[in-house]
């Protein structure tokens, strides 16, 4: 080993670095800032671990190894971690207060053809947008003078029950100067007819999300037509077939809802769908872990999967090669959503405005109306945009998982801060055994992919 240059003497091991020996006797370092791995020799591994335990020991490392360690942020300058937090806070605030884009989640109707038992939209009225509300919506968009681009997601209720409203809104948007950069829909898929497919092909729909409630038997028990009580699995599956065949430029996300009682359904359903659609590339299947609250919405309920359940479930998926799912691995994410961005809104069917999808139809969470120029409930707005930020929470600021978590879901955070919530917001990966297993599986898969490319 060569002597270090004097300028390297201030280096320290980043608090965002995790060291572990894999089950295959590989000595690995993972950094959550750079989201990267390094495989180290045993001697170097032990040396750097000792340097982390006892700061100031860094003494003799060759220049090429030193560059590798600093490039991957395993080693940082004395204030490197603090500077990272400052930069992350700056980027978070830039994203929060940017007005260049307006993001709208629009519910053209509150009506739905299903009555799923876990639906968070309680006591909702069967209301669809009127022509006046649509005109008010267009004026509301025009009032955002700084917005050059726009993103729209159709939501509900079931948005396709108000397909005529969607057509009216998109037609009126064509007269505006703002550019539609993103266009998606969250739908139960039941009404994705040939007419709907043709229309959205003409209007550049980028993304569709459709949900199944597990396998055919479970889905048909939960997602039955509210009037006829008939199951919906086969109709939705046939519509998904048509979407993939006829909408090659649109990406289809299939969410498979699970809780404690049917976690095995995901593996069964995902394998079936991936085999069924093996000739298509424009789709994904992913697990939707249901939020099931207790009666007063301060904690998770009986059938909800807790962190340990989720960790075991995701680890199980990691070992299923045919349905490999990356999200068991801590992914870097900005965590700036509609709730925490000042220029993103949820628009209800009566023109009411919310900040979070989970608040739709809750009268206590309405922050204003599209035909008014001021917030009627500014406290909710400020709670989401300011109070729920990760940099307002000292535990988040100090946490190893900050770069990949950013404080977690703002909706849950607001409930914990303002409504006596007791939700566990911390990463499932906080369990060290789970983290080690997840990282090892991810490392092995990435190494395998690289070797195949070579």
Image (tube, rainbow, N blue to C red):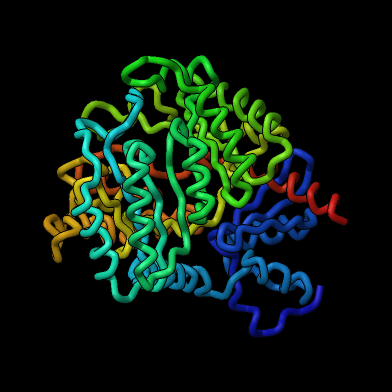
> Looking at this view, is 327 or 137 the one in front?
137
The residue at 34%/45% (across/down) is 164
User: Residue at the bottom extreme?
Assistant: 6
Does residue 394 appear anywhere in the picture? Answer: no
Please indicate whether residue 23 sits to the left or right of residue 308 in the image: right
User: Residue at the left extreme?
Assistant: 376
Vertical order, 144 against 377 (above or below)? below
The residue at 56%/34% (across/down) is 240
Vertical order, 453 against 269 (above or below)? below
User: Residue at the right extreme?
Assistant: 454
Please indicate whether residue 223 sits to the left or right of residue 330 in the image: left
The residue at 56%/62% (across/down) is 33
> Looking at this view, is 51 or 230 the one in front?
230
* Relative image position of residue 266 (x, y in whole percent): 57, 27
Viewport quadrant of the N terminus: bottom right
Q: Say which quarter of the image contains residue 223.
A: top left
Q: How many marks?
A: 0
Does residue 54 appear anywhere in the picture? Answer: yes
* Relative image position of residue 416 (x, y in whole percent): 26, 44
* Relative image position of residue 255 (x, y in whole percent): 51, 35
> Looking at this view, is 291 or 315 the one in front?
291
Q: Say which quarter of the image contains residue 439.
A: top right
Please indicate whether residue 103 sits to the left or right of residue 359 in the image: right
* Relative image position of residue 342 (x, y in whole percent): 30, 64
Q: Say which quarter of the image contains residue 243.
A: top right
The residue at 31%/18% (across/down) is 227
């Amino acid at each position: 080993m060569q002597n270090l240059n004097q300028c390297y003497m201030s280096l320290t091991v980043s608090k965002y670095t995790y060291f572990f020996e894999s089950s295959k006797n590989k000595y690995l370092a993972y950094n959550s800032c750079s989201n990267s791995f390094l495989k180290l020799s045993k001697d170097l591994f032990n040396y750097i671990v000792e340097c982390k335990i006892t700061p100031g020991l860094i003494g003799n490392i060759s220049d090429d190894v030193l560059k590798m360690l600093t490039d991957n942020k395993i080693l940082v300058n004395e204030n490197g971690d603090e500077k990272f937090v400052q930069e992350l806070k700056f980027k978070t605030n830039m994203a929060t207060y940017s007005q260049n884009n307006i993001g709208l989640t629009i519910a053209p109707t509150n009506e739905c053809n299903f009555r799923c038992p876990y639906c968070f939209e309680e006591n909702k009225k069967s209301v669809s947008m009127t022509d006046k509300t649509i005109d008010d919506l267009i004026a509301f968009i025009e009032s955002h003078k700084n917005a050059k681009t726009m993103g729209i997601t159709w939501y509900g209720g079931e948005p396709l029950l108000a397909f005529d409203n969607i057509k009216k809104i998109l037609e009126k948007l064509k007269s505006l100067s703002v550019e539609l950069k993103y266009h998606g829909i969250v739908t139960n898929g039941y009404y994705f007819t040939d007419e709907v497919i043709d229309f959205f092909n003409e209007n550049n729909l980028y993304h569709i999300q459709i949900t199944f409630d597990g396998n055919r038997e479970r889905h048909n028990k939960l997602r039955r037509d509210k009037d006829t009580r008939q199951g919906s699995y086969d109709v939705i599956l046939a519509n998904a077939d048509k979407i993939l065949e006829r909408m090659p430029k649109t990406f289809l996300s299939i969410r498979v809802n699970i809780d404690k009682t049917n976690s095995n359904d995901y593996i069964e359903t995902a394998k079936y769908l991936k085999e069924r659609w093996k000739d298509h590339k424009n789709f994904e299947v992913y697990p939707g872990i249901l939020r099931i609250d207790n009666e007063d919405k301060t904690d998770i309920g009986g059938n909800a999967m807790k962190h340990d359940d989720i960790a075991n479930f995701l680890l199980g998926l990691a070992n299923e090669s045919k349905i490999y799912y990356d999200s068991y691995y801590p992914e870097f994410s900005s965590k700036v959503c509609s709730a925490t961005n000042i220029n993103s809104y949820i628009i209800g069917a009566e023109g009411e405005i919310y900040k979070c999808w989970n608040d739709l139809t809750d009268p206590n969470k309405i922050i204003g109306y599209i035909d008014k120029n001021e917030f009627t409930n500014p406290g909710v707005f400020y709670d989401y945009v300011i109070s729920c930020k990760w940099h307002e929470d000292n535990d988040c600021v100090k946490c190893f998982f900050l770069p990949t978590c950013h404080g977690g879901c703002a909706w849950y955070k607001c409930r914990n801060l303002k409504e006596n919530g007791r939700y566990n917001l911390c990463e499932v990966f906080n369990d060290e055994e789970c983290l080690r297993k997840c990282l090892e599986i991810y490392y092995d898969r990435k190494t395998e992919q690289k070797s195949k490319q070579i």
